[in-house]
Amino acid sequence: MSARLSLMIAAVSGMLAVALGAFAAHALRSQLSERYYDIWQTAVQYQMFHTLALLAVGIMLERHSRLSLRLAAWLFTGGMLLFCGSLYMLAFTGITTLGMITPLGGGLFLAGWLMLALAVFRAPEKLNDC
């Protein structure tokens, strides 16, 4: 993934995380059970955490187009789609089988963090300029 695409996805994802959090607080709070509301909030939190991670990776990619950074960006994006997306759908629809997708997204998040650590470990002197 390019730096520009990473930063664009992070910007849109950040906006969506805020909008989905506000939507839940104002429109869904009375519509969802406490369990499903908590699931929705978990999705919002993980989306925002990984939006910030994607933003950081995008900034790093502007200076250093390393394969491990590009992979981290794709993995964080995929993780947000699968992990957060499945939780949003589960909370909204109540279809519990959607929960089977969530661990796949979590695995992508873990792999993204590993790729980010690998990028920093392999070239610490180059990444200090970020």
Image (cartoon, grey):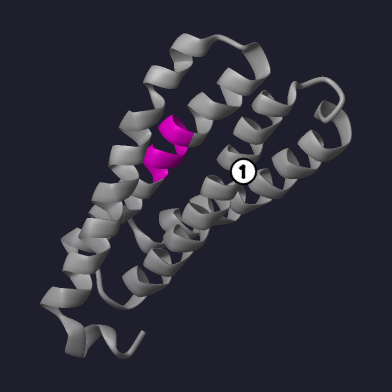
Please report the residue visible at 59 percent of the width from the left and 49 percent of the height from the top. Answer: 45
In this rendering, is residue 82 above or below 2? above
Comparing 103 with 3, the one in front is 103
In this rendering, is residue 94 above or below 71? above
Comparing 85 with 28, the one in front is 28
- Image coordinates of residue 3 in percent, x first then y, are 38, 63
Q: Main secondary structure of the magenta part?
A: helix
Query: Where, by quadrant of the figure, is residue 127 drawn?
Result: bottom left
Comparing 10 with 65, the one in front is 10
Please report the residue visible at 26 percent of the width from the left and 64 percent of the height from the top. Answer: 116
Query: Where, by quadrant of the figure, is residue 54 drawn?
Result: bottom left
Please report the residue visible at 41 percent of the width from the left and 65 percent of the height from the top. Answer: 58
- Image coordinates of residue 24 in percent, x first then y, are 77, 35
Question: Is residue 78 shown left or right of residue 41?
Answer: left
Is residue 78 inside the magenta stretch?
yes
Comparing 99 with 57, the one in front is 99
In magenta, the rendered stretch is 77-83
- Image coordinates of residue 44 in percent, x first then y, are 61, 43
Please report the residue visible at 73 percent of the width from the left and 43 percent of the height from the top. Answer: 21
- Residue linked to disc 1: 44
In this rendering, is residue 122 above or below 8? below
How packed is label 1: few (under 14 Cα within 10 Å), some, or many (20 or more)? many
Question: Is residue 16 shown left or right of residue 71?
Answer: right
* Disc 1 element: helix
